[in-house]
Image (cartoon, rainbow, N blue to C red):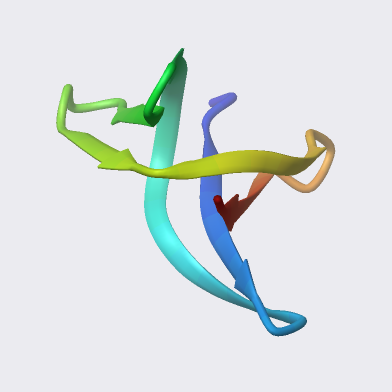
Amino acid sequence: MCEANAYLREGGLEELFFESVDKVIPREDGLILEDIFGRRKIIKAKIAELALVDHKIILEKE
């Protein structure tokens, strides 16, 4: 499986935001994250870091 977990970084701490992310869709007003089951979450954030070996997507609010 190649999905990753998305974490929201605030104040140096990373908190799990969404598990098993399969797609990240950029939009003008933020990001749409979709998991392997088709569930979606929308967040006004930017991608701060992709750690692909660790299956992590680090987000920071805009």
Residue 43 rendering spot, x and y as whole percentages: 35, 44
Q: Is residue 53 above or below residue 24?
A: below
Q: Judge by depth and name the residue closer to the eye, 27 or 8.
A: 27
Residue shown at the point (84%, 38%) measured from the top left? 53
From the viewer's perspective, is 3 left or right of 58? left
Which quadrant of the view contains residue 55?
top right
Task: Left or right? Give the position of 26 relative to 37.
Answer: right
Q: Residue drawn 43% across and 34% down?
A: 21
- Point 54% across, 63% down: residue: 8
34 sits to left or right of 5: left
Indicate the position of residue 58 as horizontal and vertical percent values: 67, 51
Find residue 22 and report its horizontal and vertical position in percent. Answer: 43, 23
Task: Please identify the quarter of the rendering in which residue 44 is found.
Answer: top left
Q: For the N terminus, which image quadrant?
A: top right
User: What residue is at 36 percent from the left and 31 percent from the top?
Assistant: 33
**Residue 61 spot, x, y in % from top left:** 53, 56
The answer to whether residue 32 is above or below residue 46 is above
Residues 28 and 13: in front is 28
